[in-house]
Amino acid sequence: MSTVTPENKTITIDRILRNFQLLDSWEEKYRFLIQLGKKISAFPEEFKVEEYRVRGCSSQVWLVRESLLEDKGVVSFKADSDSHIVKGLVAVLMALFNHQTPETILTTDVKNIFTQLGLENQLSANRTNGFYSMVEKMKQIAVEQLTANNKS
């Protein structure tokens, strides 16, 4: 599965928030984001095509829905970026959204998480727009899954 797992410990959004609060400088926080990005599982090269590219990101970002887990109500993602910082932001979103129900994905207050991390004051407008483009793509996938669940 596509999770952020250093030393077999899943990184949760709560843990990311705690770590961000412990770090003093933005240089340390950026290094932490880069380390998070390095921990996400490998992204298959065959998915690095236009069909899976997230529009609105200045960096290259690819995002796909993984096969559903045994619990058909849960959604999981695989993603990658050609930018180290953006890949770290991908890892944050995967910690927030992977293995969640579509309803949870659709109702999660991502802006609040973004604010708690302090990213609104540190990322460029292009990176911020790209972050929210990834969120919208993940929510679109959640809507598709919710629709499929309701049909079955």
Image (tube, helix red, strand yellow):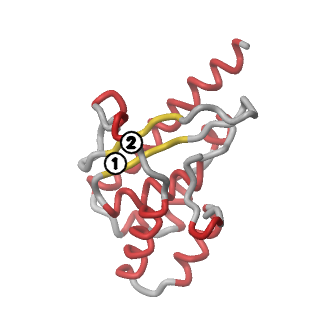
What residue is shown at x 51% (from left), y 58% (from top)?
A: 92
Marks 2 and 1 close (CB-CB < 8 Å): yes
Dot 2 amino acid type: Ser
Point out the residue furthest to the left here. 58
Point out the residue furthest to the top here. 151
Q: Bin the neighbour count of mark 1 within 10 Å (Cα to Cα): few under 14, some 14-19, many 20 and up.
A: many
The image position of residue 10, as x and y in percent, is 64, 62
33 left or right, relative to 50:
right
The image position of residue 108, as x and y in percent, is 62, 47
Query: Does 20 sit above or below residue 62?
Result: below
46 left or right, relative to 135:
left
Query: Does 102 sit above or below residue 93?
Result: above
Helix, strand, or loop for circle 2? helix
Picture quadrant of residue 148: top right
Q: Distance between the residues labelled 2 and 1?
A: 5 Å
Q: Which mark is drawn over residue 85?
A: none
Q: Which mark is drawn over residue 130?
A: 1
Dot 1 amino acid type: Gly
Q: Which mark is drawn over residue 133?
A: 2
The image position of residue 3, as x and y in percent, is 57, 53
The image position of residue 37, as x and y in percent, is 43, 61
What residue is shown at x 49% (from left), y 43% (from top)?
A: 78
What residue is shown at x 48% (from left), y 57% (from top)?
A: 40
Q: Which residue occupies the foreground of this view, 106 or 35?
A: 35
Picture quadrant of residue 28: bottom left
Q: Bin the neighbour count of mark 2 within 10 Å (Cα to Cα): few under 14, some 14-19, many 20 and up.
A: some
Helix, strand, or loop for circle 1? helix
Picture quadrant of residue 9: bottom right
